[in-house]
Image (tube, rainbow, N blue to C red):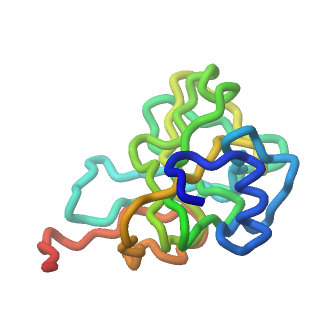
Amino acid sequence: MNDHGWITGDEIAKAVSAQEITIEPFNFAQINPNSYNYRLSARIKRITSEIIDLRREDEYEELEIPESGLILEPGECYLGSTVEILGSMKYASLITGRSSIGRRFVTNHVTAGLIDQGFEGHVTLEITVQKPTRVYPDIEFGQIFWFTTSGVPLLYEGKYQDQRGPTIARTDNGKKKTV
């Protein structure tokens, strides 16, 4: 494939079959014309820090979303994660909302939507709501799409590689990275 851009749902399924994209577990019914619907894991973290300090780890409480649902409250900061392990060495990807979730004023990722080539793991979701909102485990919560890149990729080897479950911000304590 020499074209650059988003790949279609059909191409996503083929790339999963060819082991060029990781979606574990994979369900063909979650394929869309240009994306794949990811599901919300039953584990969630609510940030409890009174002040968020970019040089310190956040305090949090772990919550389990029961089958009957969990009500998320406005003004709170929640970290969820995908049920699926996602990644690719060949494609970069982005996560975004689904219209049916967004129309309920649920933000399922605040800013961190880019998934670099080489990353593999559960994707942590930064979740906020505008009104009290009941969420359920395993609900199709957002979508991920993959796109081709040009040039030689610099594969992801960062601090969130292989993360499992919702992962709080890992701080470098203000240290500058050297390249």
User: Residue reaching furthest front?
Assistant: 2
Residue nearer the viewer, 9 or 38: 9
Residue 60 in percent (x, y) is at 45, 58
Looking at the image, residue 96 lies above or below residue 129: below
Residue that appears at 39% across and 43% down:
111
Looking at the image, residue 129 lies above or below residue 94: above
Residue that appears at 20% across and 64% down:
55
Q: Is residue 10 left or right of residue 8?
A: right
Residue that appears at 51% across and 23% down:
130
Residue that appears at 49% across and 59% down:
92
Looking at the image, residue 19 lies above or below residue 168: below
Residue 157 in percent (x, y) is at 40, 79
Residue 48 in percent (x, y) is at 41, 51
Image quadrant occupied by the N terminus: bottom right
Q: How many marks?
A: 0
Looking at the image, residue 27 lies above or below residue 19: above
Q: Is residue 139 left or right of residue 163?
A: right
Residue nearer the viewer, 156 or 70: 156
When asked about the image quadrant of residue 158, the answer is: bottom left
Residue nearer the viewer, 44 or 17: 17
